[in-house]
Image (spheres, rainbow, N blue to C red):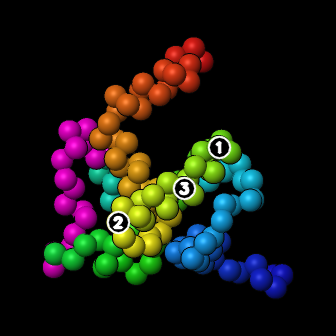
Amino acid sequence: MKEGTGGDPFGDDPIDDQPPEDDPGPDTGATSAMTTTSTSAESKSGSASASGEDDDRDQNDDGLPWAVQRNSVKSGREMVQFYLREFVQERETDFKRDVEAETGYETYLTDVREAAYLVAMKHPEEVAELLDEWGCEYV
């Protein structure tokens, strides 16, 4: 076996998992695929309810928040890959900063992405409206 081929390709990626430096600047690498994650529990039990009810998977039996009890940012998550246009990738950096300004603390991009996705799931009518604007009904 060649040297270096036995590594874990899905192990923690320190670049994506670490909070940004003080001024990370926009991502200049134009990647055609971005990854987002979903919880394993959610993928096994179905999607979150459309009514927006709180999900008790956000805390463990001790009442600790999920983000505090996990071992790493990827704990309990499965990788899901999807494609984004360049302007969406560029806006993601600003969106993350805006979220951090609201919360008052730095957070992982993976957490921001998953939270944004869950919020969108509570507003399917807005998602449907945007899809109509994009002309998805004609494809």
Quadrant position of residue 39: bottom left
Q: Quadrant of the N terminus?
A: bottom right
Gap between marks 3 and 1 measured at Cα: 11 Å
Q: Which mark is residue 94?
A: 3
Mark 1 or mark 3, which is nearer the start of the sequence?
1
Mark 3–mark 2 Cα distance, whole angstroms, equals 14 Å
Q: Earlier in the sequence, mark 3 or mark 2?
A: 3
Q: Main secondary structure of the magenta part?
A: loop
Mark 1: amino acid: Phe
The tag on residue 87 is 1
User: Element under label 3?
Assistant: helix
Viewer-side residue, 50 vs 15:
15
**Which residues, given as a range, are shown in magenta?**
47-62
Look at label 2 and name its amino acid.
Answer: Thr
For this view, does 130 lie left or right of residue 6?
A: left
Q: Is residue 33 visible?
A: yes
Q: Secondary structure at mark 2?
A: helix
| Label 3 vs label 1, nearer the camera | 3
* Crowd tier of the residue under label 1, counting other residues whose Cα lies within 10 Å: few below 14, some 14–19, many 20 or above: few
Does 106 appear above or below 82?
A: below
Circle 1 sits in a helix, a strand or a loop, which is it?
Answer: helix
Residue 30 in percent (x, y) is at 75, 53
The dot on residue 103 is 2
Is 53 on the left-hand or right-hand side of 72? Answer: left
